Image (cartoon, helix red, strand yellow):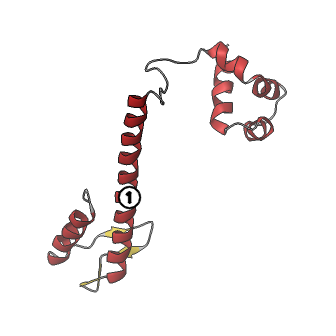
Amino acid sequence: MGRNLFDILSTLEVFNEKNITLKVDNLGIESLVNGKPNSAFKLIISVMANIAEMKQTMLERQREGIKIAIAKGIYKGRVKGSKETDQHVLDKYKNVVKYLKQGQSLRNTAKLCNVSLGTVQKVKGILGQK
């Protein structure tokens, strides 16, 4: 609806002036109730917009921090375009390979090997290719 809280509230006011009801289905609330502005809707939208703004601020600060760390030579990160080979992944997660070959479920394998479900799915995909 907008880039910041002010934009969103301005858009909401325009909708209200034109008697356009904005409905958020997953929250079950509407901007107009019986033709009058819903203050609870405005409050919830304000909170959600503030959270979105805070997230953007955090991401900006993170990017700034990374730039500073790179300039100091502290943070290097992964080389762009680099990728682990399939064999390297299989060697790195030998326990995951072992449990998958034994017929363990993906989630159980993730728990047993203390890795994420995504990692187990990645290994299973590589095994399926071979």
Say which residue appears at 16% left-offset and 71% top-offset.
14
Say which residue appears at 35% left-offset and 46% top-offset.
60
Q: Is residue 30 above or below residue 124?
A: below
Say which residue appears at 53% left-offset and 18% top-offset.
83
The single residue placed furthest to the right in the displayed view is 102
Tell me how many marks there are.
1
Residue 116 x/y as whole percent: 67, 38
Q: Nearer the viewer, residue 68 or 43?
A: 68
Quadrant location of residue 46? Answer: bottom left
Quadrant location of residue 55? Answer: bottom left
Report whether 55 appears left or right of 118. left
Q: Is residue 108 above or below residue 99?
A: below
Q: Nearer the viewer, residue 49 or 100?
A: 49
**Amino acid found under the numbered disc labelled 1:** Met
Q: Is residue 74 above or below residue 44?
A: above
Quadrant location of residue 92? Answer: top right
Quarter the C terminus occupies: top right
The single residue placed furthest to the front in the displayed view is 72
Quarter the N terminus occupies: bottom left
Q: Is residue 23 above or below residue 92?
A: below
Q: Nearer the viewer, residue 75 or 95?
A: 75
Q: Which residue is under mark 1?
A: 54
Residue 78 x/y as whole percent: 49, 24
Residue 38 x/y as whole percent: 31, 82
Say which residue appears at 81% left-offset and 38% top-offset.
112
Report whether 128 appears left or right of 100. left
Looking at the rendered structure, the secondary structure element under dot 1 is helix
Q: Residues within 10 Å of mark 1 (few under 14, many from 20)?
A: few
